[in-house]
């Protein structure tokens, strides 16, 4: 099978997007601590009584710094979620039913969950098993899988290749087992993607046509445009009835689904 399918968008043309396990919290951590140290430096180092008390208090209660960082992270994530929700409200057509997307659950479900993900995203892999348990626990909910390969860099197009392969498996009715296997694979390569397809009953000869088709390229390009328009910041991103969850934690996704059911 060929492995040189053209990516839906070149890596250097995309915004800087990463796994949501790696942003914005890790960056905020370093920024917050440095800013706090700089802000306190004149008082802590001048020998004054107030500075000495502040320094002593922080040394005795280092958890305060953790609380400051956590509060900043939550505030930043809330702002990002609000931006996504505003964009989703203004562009509801981008989250409308697309028959090209793999999905599980009734088409007329009162609650729809959409996940944007990359098969090499650590956050996506970390929550995948729990997300699938949530899928099985909610047969009345529609779960839509948006293949959004954003982690390719330079000549490495494995994420794009995996997304195309998954869509080829979908065309043969083998999407979910392939999706599970790709998420479970610790390190993906094009060769490993091919092995996953074969191991899950996908006809590789038929898959080649879908994998390299212009229609597949257009599908992935449309998902990329939708993600940019919705101002998504990374993978995975979950939207429940058009509203983004504040975190990627499975319990938060389950809670959002339960709330949507109550309001349906």
Image (cartoon, rainbow, N blue to C red):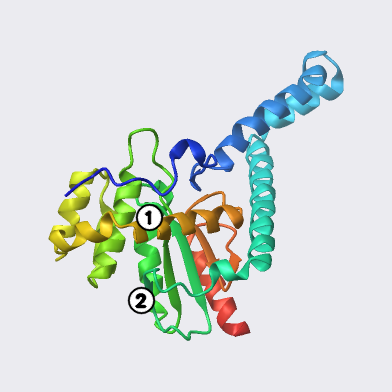
Percent position of residue 176, x then y: 29, 68
Does residue 244 appear left or right of residue 200 in this picture? right
Dot 2 falls on a residue whose secondary structure is helix
Q: Nearer the viewer, mark 2 or mark 1?
A: 1
Q: Are marks 2 and 1 in contact (CB under 8 Å)?
A: no
Q: Which is more toward the observer, 262 or 70?
A: 262
| Residue at (82, 20) in percent of width and height | 43
Q: Mark 2: give few (<14), some (14-19) or many (20+) Cα within 10 Å.
A: few
Pick the quarter of the image with the C terminus.
bottom right
Of all residues, the one furthest to the top in this rendering is: 46
Question: Residue 225, relative to residue 152: is it above or below?
Answer: below
Q: Mark 1: give few (<14), some (14-19) or many (20+) Cα within 10 Å.
A: some
Pick whichever of labels 2 and 1 is earlier in the sequence.
2
Q: In this figure, which residue is indicated by the disc labeled 1?
A: 217
Q: Which is more toward the observer, 102 or 113?
A: 102
Spatial CA distance of label 2 from label 1 is 30 Å
Question: Residue 56, relative to residue 203: is it above or below?
Answer: above
Question: Residue 112, relative to residue 56: is it above or below?
Answer: below
Percent position of residue 106, x then y: 41, 84
Does residue 236 appear left or right of residue 259 in this picture? left
Residue 104 appears in the rendering: yes
Does residue 60 appear left or right of residue 217 in this picture? right
Question: Residue 119, relative to residue 141: is it above or below?
Answer: above
Percent position of residue 216, x then y: 35, 59
| Residue at (55, 38) in percent of width and height | 26
The number of callouts visible is 2
Does residue 2 appear left or right of residue 137 in this picture? left
Percent position of residue 6, x then y: 34, 45
Q: In this figure, which residue is indicated by the disc labeled 2?
A: 136
Q: Which is more toward the observer, 26 or 190?
A: 190
Residue 179 appears in the rendering: no
């Amino acid at each position: 099978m060929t492995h040189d399918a053209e990516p839906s968008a070149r890596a250097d043309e995309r915004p800087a997007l990463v796994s949501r396990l790696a942003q914005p919290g890790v960056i905020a951590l370093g920024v917050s601590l440095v800013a706090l140290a700089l802000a306190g430096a004149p008082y802590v180092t001048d020998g004054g009584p107030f500075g000495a008390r502040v320094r002593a208090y922080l040394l005795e209660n280092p958890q305060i710094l953790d609380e400051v960082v956590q509060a900043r992270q939550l505030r930043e994530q809330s702002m990002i979620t609000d931006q996504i929700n505003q964009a989703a409200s203004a562009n509801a057509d981008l989250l409308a039913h697309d028959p090209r997307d793999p999905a599980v659950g009734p088409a007329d479900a009162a609650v729809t969950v959409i996940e944007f993900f990359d098969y090499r995203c650590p956050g996506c892999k970390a929550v995948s098993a729990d997300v699938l348990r949530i899928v099985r626990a909610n047969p009345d909910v529609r779960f839509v899988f948006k293949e959004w390969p954003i982690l390719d860099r330079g000549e490495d197009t494995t994420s794009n290749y995996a997304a195309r392969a998954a869509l080829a498996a979908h065309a043969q009715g083998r999407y979910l087992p392939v999706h599970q296997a790709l998420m479970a694979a610790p390190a993906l390569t094009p060769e490993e993607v091919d092995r996953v397809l074969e191991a899950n009953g996908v006809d590789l000869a038929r898959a080649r046509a879908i994998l390299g088709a212009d229609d597949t390229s257009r599908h992935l390009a449309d998902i990329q445009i939708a993600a940019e328009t919705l101002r998504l910041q990374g993978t995975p991103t979950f939207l429940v009835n058009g509203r983004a969850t504040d975190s990627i934690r499975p319990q938060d996704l389950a809670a959002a689904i339960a709330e949507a059911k109550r309001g349906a």
